[in-house]
Image: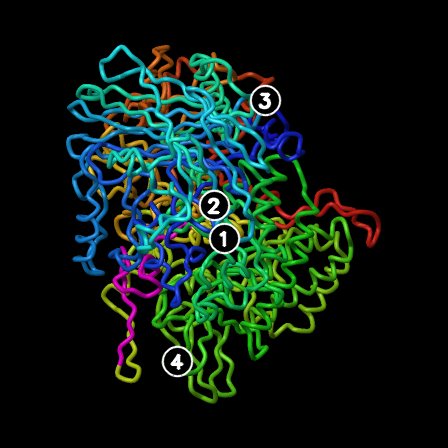
Amino acid sequence: MVLVGGKQEVPSAEEQRLKEDKDRVKYWKHFGPYVAERQWATVREDYSHDGDAWSHFTYDMARSRAFRWGEDGIAGVSDTHGRLNIAFAFWNEKDGHLKERLFGLSNPQGVHGESIKECHFHLDNTPTHSYMKYLYKLPQKEFPYEDIIKENQRRSKKDREYGLVDTGIFNDNRYWDCFIETAKEKDNPDELLFRVTCYNRGPDPAKIHILPHVWFRNTWAWGRDDYKPNIKQDGPLQTHISHRDLGDRYAQFSPSPNSCGRDDDVEPEFLFTDNDSNLVDLWGSKKNPTPYVKDAFHKRVVKGDKKAVNPDKTGTKSAAWYAFNQGQGVPPGECAVVRFRVSTKHADSYLDEEEFDDVMDQRLAEADEFYFKINPMPMSDDLRNIQRQAFSGMMWCKQYYHFIWDQWANGDPGSPPPPPERKSVRNSQWKHMHLDDVLSMPDSWEYPFFAAWDTAFHCIPIAIIDPEYAKKQLDLFTREWYMHPNGQLPAYEWNFSDVNPPVHAWSVFRTFKIERKMYGREDLDFLERVFQKLLMNFTWWCNRKDYEGKNVFEGGFLGLDNIGLFNRSDPLPTGGTLEQADATGWMAFYCLSMLNISLELAKHRRIYEDIASKFFEHFILISDAMQYRLGSEAKSLWNDEDGFYYDAITWGGSHAHQMHVRSMVGLIPMYATLTLEPQVLKSFPKFRRHVDWVIKNKKEVVERNIASIDRRGKDQRLLLSLVNEDRLRSILKYMLDESEFLAPNGIRSLSKFHQKHPVSMDVKGQNYSVGYVPGDSDSGLFGGNSNWRGPIWLAVNFLLIESLLRFYMFYGNTFKVECPTGSGDYMHLGHVAEEIQHRLQHLMTYDEQGRRAMHDGNKMLNNDPHWRDYMWFYEFFDGDTGRGLGASHQTGWTGLMAKMIHDTGVNCRLPQTPRSPSAAASHYFDDTFLRQRRASLAGRRPSGIKRSVTRRRSIGNRSETGRSDVTNGTTGEAEDDNTNTNGDTGGDGRSWTIYNEDDPKKGVPDDPDDPINRYVQEQLKRIRSNEAPEYSEELSAQTDGADDDEGTGPVDASLDDEL
């Protein structure tokens, strides 16, 4: 149960479901949104000789070709092993095939690599998937497949990507808003309810066909298991679903109200076929193994071929075909509605629509309550909506992932053997892999495969709403069927052997702390189990990425793709060795994360004091490796003249070259920062003695690279850091300079200085250069679908923010810097961290003109009521404008926005608020707590997204979303007459005004018995004082009443309640 103010409230219905799932009382997560949005062109489905996954299995092939390792679909739901799948298809009577899956371009086709060319949104989803909502926008005109392909082929890398919105297909609102909702019964996780509501947004009547699909993943055609499950018609409105592992289930469909102006209901026609490949159409075979194949529904619905489907009404793939095509079709503004349920019970009567809709309403009300308890602080509807969709996107990015290396590499008995050379194309050293899990994907379409460091960031926001799932994700990567026997974590399926930054330990400890702080639970078994495996991974790093044993790490690209002059995963064209400031910084950060975990475990087992001592000393050694070698002279990777960290190439002897590229590489050493409370040293005497010994006996090494090892800061805290105070000030001068790193919407990955001053090097007649490119990549390096030469990336910004907070815990209010540089406005580092978080939030929030930076001025996306409140979570953002770039459903790490809103959304000022040297912001929020919870279905729903609960059978408005009143293009932001005029400004120049969400006269009075109210009032009191929050319980190592006597009793030395 979520703790509020350190105390538990009565659990919400969703919290109770999570508890039942955790305790294995009920399997609430048995069914969820686990169907991929793209299975075609994945490495798993690639059986080519050269590893060209994009051409081996194309979008067009997916209609006719059975997948070997998974399934895909629109708003798909499946069991945790991807056996039974439910998804949706649509047809507008204009397209040449059913819209059965989402369309996008392959990597070679796209201007900047692979990219989806659809418009869909993940609107809602709870951790147990008791309620889910998905929006797909279906054009009423013919889908512009060829136009998209040809126009993107015509464009160069310096041009923008050409997307579906750019085609003009949505002009005049000629499209359908298809809302797809899924709910579970109150007491039965296997009872699934589905409702599809499609609104005609256009000016004229239009026709639409809605086809819910129910089918089985093909497990029978590969020669390993010939068991074939079955779906067959069982009555006029019901099908019987049979599987040996899942048992018997029934799909019951309801007649739909005829929204085409007729009195008769629209009843579905049931279609059946088999989920087998159409070998005749694909490869010209003489005959298919089965007469009814995967693409039968396209031929039946679009081509009118009645012989394509099984007349016996049985198969492994089924659809219920609802045709809303009577007369002229559905009138403008009206909707077509389809309801059905998948149940373990045989239905003997019609589906009760009123009862059905009540269940939907109740699950939605419970979702409202759950998400409100996660963050009860008063904030704008806009921010609350962004956070809700961020959490929901994280849940929609859960996908079933299946991969068995031996079967994939050697082929199946029932299929032609794969070309022998394919074994050496990729992943030949990962023969142990046997994956059969639901995993958190970086993006639901563009990256339908796991990525190790992405997952680490995913788990931070996920831990807020579902710590069990977050812990399982982190644990899986260290299990023997994932982790390589040598200790390496798999990177991603295109190359498991590639190297991602070592952030796993940080995420493990962070997740542990979030669960303890928010839910009052300490999962020490999880912490110790993963820690033991991470010891192997740490050793792998030391053995494989520090070849000379000098604690200088290389690492390769480390997730930063094209950030350097050269491809950092390949041998240098110059020869020599690249000594990386970021790689060594990452390893120092890894060390400190392991030190944190060691001390936490030492509270319960004293032996971990020794391991903590080991990581403390290893940190000292790694910190001394922030150097490159010039002859016999050792010099730091720090450049004294510029005051910044750079990578260096060394060739041995006296030959070395430092590359003066100001990039995120030079900021990453700030990550390696840790504050320790004085009680820690007192409560762990063996650890304290070792620290004292190191300081005494390795003083030169300590002083050379570590900040303040023997100086105590605020509250006598100890600081371990690669960056001392002078270097910190120098780095921050660059980082907070708006002509360098500081953008209106966050910290750039490369300094804007390089826009006019690119760095280049000629090697063997070829020129290599790095310049500031704020938008999409202008080269094909690393696939060309990401860019680290200027854009803003949330993941690395998030770690910078945490580092600033750790520094703040040491230096306190006395350490202030200009923010922005040259503004004359000085802030302590706590407020600098908050300022960066607010700038990042401004990527997605409305500004004073009602525009979102990520939409780049697009009027439809900013102003149209049917678009403006739906969020895309882009992979990265333009360093100048904030325009969204890359993958558009990257709630993987862009979902970190939910955590930042959780921490600082309550006092997030409006974007573009005027600044002065004495005023950092001019908008604050009301200090009156407004009850926005909905305790029951009859309660008051939070303002913002709202729904009508009309009892019309078509219930168009029941699924509709509408916005609350908008004032001056914003979501209820305060007008000038609400401005605080009492001159209340803080000592650092941050002034505030009052934000009134509702009429202040209607504010709810304080309730001393309401823990949420008390919690909110305490937080608002802190904010009004203009003091930064005390981060010691989140960011510093501390003890909780630990025994001070050496070696006696258990020690409760809590290292920060969250970090």
Q: Amino acid at mark 2?
A: Asn
Quarter assignment of residue 334: top left
Q: Which mark is residue 218?
A: 2
Horizontally, is 672 left or right of 796 in the view? right
- Secondary structure of the residue carrying numbered label 2: loop
- Residue 362 among magenta residues: no
Query: Of tags 4 and 3, which is closer to the observer?
Result: 3
Say if 199 sits above or below 855 in the image: above
Q: Which mark is residue 187?
A: 3
Instruction: Give neighbour class at mark 1: few <14, some 14-19, many 20+ (Cα, 10 Å).
Output: some
Determine the main secondary structure of the stretch shown in magenta.
loop
Say if 441 sits above or below 928 in the image: below
Distance from disc 2 to disc 4, alpha carbons, whole Å, reads: 56 Å
- Which of the two discs, 4 and 1, labels the residue nearer the N terminus? 1
Horizontally, is 915 left or right of 715 in the view? left
Q: Amino acid at mark 1?
A: Trp
Query: Of tags 3 and 1, which is closer to the observer?
Result: 1
Disc 4: which residue: 657
Horizontally, is 849 left or right of 570 in the view? left
Q: How many marks?
A: 4
Image x and y of residue 970, in percent: 28, 29
